[in-house]
Image (cartoon, rainbow, N blue to C red):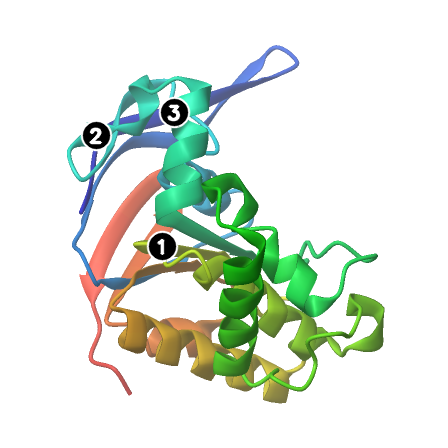
Amino acid sequence: MYVLTGVTKRYTRGKAIVNALDGVDLTIGDGDRLVIQGPTGGGKSTLLQMLGGLDKPTTGSVELDGVDLAKLSESRLTTVRSQNIGFVFQSFNLIPTLTAQENVETALVPLGVKTKERRERAAEALESVGLGERLGHLPGEMSGGQQQRVAIARALVKQPKVLLADEPTGNLDESMRDEIMDVLDRMWKEHGLTFIVVTHDSSIARKAPRLATIRKGKITVKENAPS
């Protein structure tokens, strides 16, 4: 479970101080599916970075299972991210010179998983997202949707507790958007993940059980009736 209390994040732009997050209080239960929406620059990605331990708040606490991520050393944060948190980004972030299977295996290297097991788990993860026949393909040999499936497999192969997705369909057309969200929703249900997604897409937001809206660093959360 996440518990955020009084989280602020301030940046300095020239002589101006910008409050990307301004006193955010938020609880996200185990297994929740939360969509975060809001205008550009409103604090969505900043909040996701806090949840992923990629950034620390100026003030306040970000607790994951009772551990305040804001107080951890960088080495300890790296361990928490490696073991517990999977990330999916808009730009896929695949290594172009590695095959699909090798890209997925990279998530297991920090965990000390042996080569044979890495290969087996990577192949299984790719099979689960419908890419069992694409193990040896390079990113440049795959469509955008296929590359995002590889990124999803990479995020899930380490069996994380939390899946964070930042505009995961932002580079995809409408039909591929629906396909990728179907994959993500299926993974959420099958793995019992806590799934948090940032999106500009209102059609995705309408289907979320919970919707958080951020404007000028302030957050409001409502329960949705899924369509």
Q: Mark 2 is on which residue type?
A: Val
Please, is residue 22 above or below residue 117 in the view? above
Structural crowding at the residue carrying mark 3, measured as other residues with C-alpha within 10 Å and reported as few (<14), some (14–19) or many (≥20) = few
Q: What element carries label 1?
A: loop
Marks 2 and 1 sit apart, C-alpha to C-alpha, by: 16 Å
**Quarter residue 188 falls in:** bottom left
Residue 67's tag is: 2
Q: Can residue 88 be seen in this view?
A: yes
In this view, the residue in front, 23 or 27, is 27
Q: Which one is in front, 198 or 147?
A: 147
Label 3 sits on residue:
76
Q: Assess whether mark 1 and mark 2 are in contact (beta carbons under 8 angstroms).
A: no
Q: Which amino acid does label 1 sit on?
A: Pro
Label 3 to label 2: alpha-carbon separation: 11 Å
Q: Which residue is drawn at 30% across and 56% down?
A: 212
Q: Is mark 3 on a helix, strand or loop?
A: helix
* Residue 18 rendering spot, x and y as whole percentages: 50, 24
Q: Residue 160 carries which label?
A: 1
Q: Which of marks 2 and 1 is in front?
A: 1
Image side of residue 35 versus residue 120, left or right: left
Q: In which quarter of the image is residue 219?
A: top left
* Amino acid at dot 3: Arg
Residue 117 placed where, x, y %?
Answer: 50, 61
Q: Position of residue 146 (x, y in %)?
A: 67, 78
C-beta proximity under 8 Å, tags 3 and 1: no
> Image point 42% across, 60% down: which residue?
197
